[in-house]
Amino acid sequence: MEHEQLLDDIAGFCKQAGIAESTLGRLAVNDGKFVQRARDGATIGKSTITRVYDFMEDVKTGKRVVKGRARRKRSVASAEVLSEIRESETSVRPYRAHEYNDERQKHHLLANTCNEKWVIADRCYNAMFDMEFKPPAFRIFDGSLGNGIVTARVLRALHAQHPNIPFQIVAKERGLDDLRNALGRFSDRFLEHPLTVLVVTNMYFDEATTLTTNSEQSTMPLNWQEVPLKGTTAYDFQQQISALHPQLAKDWRLKTGKDGQPLYEKPNVLVLYREDHKFLLDDVIPRPGYERPEYDFILASHLYSHTASEDFKINKVLKPLAESLAPGGRMLVIQSYGQDPAHDVVKRIWKDEAPVFVRREEVINALRSSLRENKRKFTFTGATDKTSLFRFDMHTLPIDPHNEIGTSTLLTAWNNLVYVCQVPEESVDDVMKKNGDFLKVTTDVINEYGGLWFINESFVMKRSNN
């Protein structure tokens, strides 16, 4: 091309100045199509070329000023945009209690790669489908809201059977990350089932069931937030719930206690319902200081570790929940059982140090004894393994486990199995640093069993109707 150098110079100049090539043609030689005609092979006189170079030189030296569009000044615009991006966060990260936050990340990985939440939701519904529903609402307490999958799936099933009965869900959740994930799943619940009241709290079990602080925490003011959701679409509800996130990040902070356990900085209660159904839900919406509630169904899924003391399991967790059951109410308790591929991996690596799972029979006996004279009000199901044990799977493993499994998938399997088996973090770190065979052992077990799956055990506690 005869004018190749000229066109290259024009392209570089326009990019730096942030102007279009047509603008250069118009300002330099009064011809907006000049550059395009030159590219098409038109003859350009020497005087015209001189005028173009003179124009570009005047701009470079400041004799002439041209204002280009910011979007065309790519180098400048990119720097400005990147600077803004670096200075702006799209979300507020969890605050303090780093060990707890790290634990929740492991839990998220398990929840996203296994079907445990789905299986538990089905088990919940099977445990409640034949219950008698009494006014003013069917009340549920979820001891660990988590990412909200279980509760949302249960509510969908309940709506299919009871579309016109009010539901009140009181759920305990300490961490900000789980809270945000869970709330995001309830927009469609408020749309499909307008007679829904969702209450979330970060308080301890003996406080959460009553939505009041105990004597030890009475000096802390209870942060009670009632949010009537306006609108009639899931998008309306989603936008209002999302708008709560910045304030939730300030209120739902965790701190680390003396023994390393996560503690709340302030007690919180968040109440959500549809404003256009407030009149119908008046007897269902809780208020600060209202009388002690009783729940028709309580889900107590993985609320304690196997190494926790019996006093903690019973007196701090299960007994306060059991005492909150309404006449005719039921509580479903779920814990890990072991005797599965995950447990096998742990036993092969740690041998004599493998965790020992506390069986449901011990928990039932201790819970029954703690109720003393009230124990006659309660009956327990789940005495046999056939009704108690159930399985869930890691469903992101390849269908044919004998094919080579990617490292990332193996690491996910490893994370899931040590998390479910509650292997101490320091033991896991030590093995990963010193024993390079942990992935080989995991692979061998997965191939032997045809996959990675886990066994839970459960029992149902029922309160009589009087």
Image: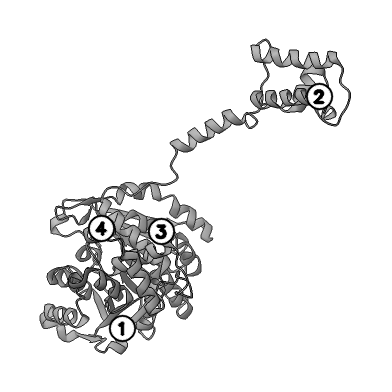
> Is 224 situated left or right of 40 in this image?
left
Mark 3, residue position: 181
Q: Residue furthest right?
A: 43
> Is 280 situated left or right of 145 in this image?
right
Dot 1 amino acid type: Leu
* Callout 3: SS: helix
Q: Identify which residue is drawn at 50% across, 69% down.
A: 192
Q: CA distance from mark 4 to mark 3?
A: 36 Å
Dot 3 amino acid type: Asn
Dot 2 amino acid type: His
Which mark is drawn over residue 3? 2
* Callout 2: SS: loop
Q: Position of residue 322 (x, y in %)?
A: 21, 76
Q: Position of residue 435 (x, y in %)?
A: 27, 61
Depth check, mark 4 against mark 3: the one in front is 4
Which mark is drawn over residue 434? 4
Q: Quadrant of residue 418?
A: bottom left
